[in-house]
Amino acid sequence: MFNTFVLLFIEFFKTGLFTFGGGFGSLPFLYRMAEIYPWFSYHDLTQLIAISGITPGPIGLNMATFAGFKTLGFFGSIISSFALILPMLIITSRIFKLYDKFEKNTYVKSVLYVLRPTSCALIASVGAKLFYNLVLKNDLTLANVDKSAFLLVLFLFVLTFRLKRDPIIYMSIAAIIGIIYFITTT
Amino acid sequence: MSCAKANLLNIFKVFVKIGLVLLGGGYVIIPIMQSEIVEKRGWIDKDELLDYYCVSQCLPGIIAINMAILVGYKLAKMKGAIVSTFAMSLTPFISIVLIASFMQKIMHLQYIEGLFWGVNLSVIVLIYLTLKEMWKKSITDFFTIFWFVLIFLLSAFKISPAILIIVSILLGALMGAIKRRKNV
């Protein structure tokens, strides 16, 4: 129990420290936790992402709170969200004092030059994993493709040509379609 | 215009409000802060807000939280940063804990399942949108394409993301050191 508290703290501190590229940047770390700890499964993770997306607040923070709750209840959620925010409080407040110099610094520029494609790749791999699980149904031969899932993704993709990139719009549309689809097919 | 002074209590109130209306993560933080902090209260100006947004994107962590820290720090140093972060996280935290506690009871409902099904599929498209946005700034030449493919493959082989990020930071620092040497 105590061990899990410490591990939870360390894992979410790490997540806060190494998340780049906004809320979805922390997804690779949550998938990693689902892989190596018995705290929550991939299936829990999909629920967790959905709920975090449609609840007010930054998605990254919501996911951490939820994951902490799944693992150790109320105290778990306090630990995970505190651990997530702590590295930001430490680093960002330090940066404030020198932020004029920050963006022009050679080291910062070079680090970001390598780090940006890394976060792109990590987030892309989560996207690929989700597509593999939810649409291809874990089967690369395309024999088990969930056709309605594929159609919904395609539809949302087409919408991106027309709509703004505000996530809540897409999540709401998808939620409504999902609800109607599940009620009418059963 | 700036009727409310930026004391800790007022910072707390404003950021609770921001946390309450912050839906869908970092993307809406600019318009919300623009109206609450720049226009209604005049605590910072518009250029500062955009600066904070740019810096927040380069910093580790969640963009909205980093912006709360920067604004809070500007208004009342470390105390301000802690209060703004805490206040902004309050509503999201409570809502998630409440939803998580009641979830077991509603999970089996048909329409809730449909809701999750839809929202999860939308995440695939949202990830695509995030990538499209990041792509322009990130993939700029041959090396960055190569590095993207390499990291994508390594993460498919289940290498820990933390390790991949640390390696990237080290490589970037090394490149920075070499560049500096050349310039001197």
Image (cartoon, coloured by chain):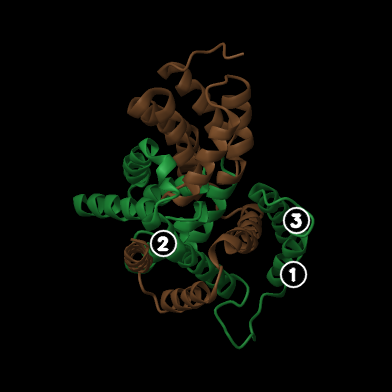
Which residue in the structure is indicated by mark 2? A110
- Report whether mark 3 lies on the same chain as mark 1: yes
> Which comes before the other along the chain, label 2 or label 3?
2
Decide which of B143, B60 is in the foreground and name it. Answer: B143
Residue B142 vs A40, above or below: the answer is below
Q: Amino acid at mark 1?
A: Leu
Category of crowding for the residue at label 3, using alpha-carbon neighbours closer than 10 angstroms: few (below 14), some (14–19), many (at least 20) = some
Q: Kindly report the distance in space between the C-alpha atoms of the residues bearing marks 2 and 3.
A: 49 Å
Q: Residue at x 57, y 53 (%)?
A: A50
Q: Who's green, chain-wise?
A: A
Which residue in the structure is indicated by mark 1? A151
Query: For residue B141, what is the image quadrant?
Result: bottom right
Looking at the image, do the residues carrying marks 2 and 1 touch, with CB atoms under 8 Å apart? no
Query: In the structure shown, which secondary structural element does the residue marked by tag 2 occupy?
Result: helix
Image coordinates of residue A93 in percent, x first then y, are 36, 37
Q: Is residue A171 visible?
A: yes
Chain letter of the residue beneath label 2 in the structure image: A
Residue lying at the far right of the rendered structure: A162
Which residue in the structure is indicated by mark 3? A180
Residue lying at the far bottom of the rendered structure: A141
Q: Who's brown, chain-wise?
A: B
Q: Kindly report the distance in space between the C-alpha atoms of the residues bearing marks 2 and 1.
A: 41 Å
Q: How many numbered marks appear? A: 3
Decide which of A3, A118 is in the foreground and name it. Answer: A118
- Report whether mark 2 lies on the same chain as mark 1: yes
- Marks 2 and 3: which is nearer the front? 2
Q: Amino acid at mark 2?
A: Ser
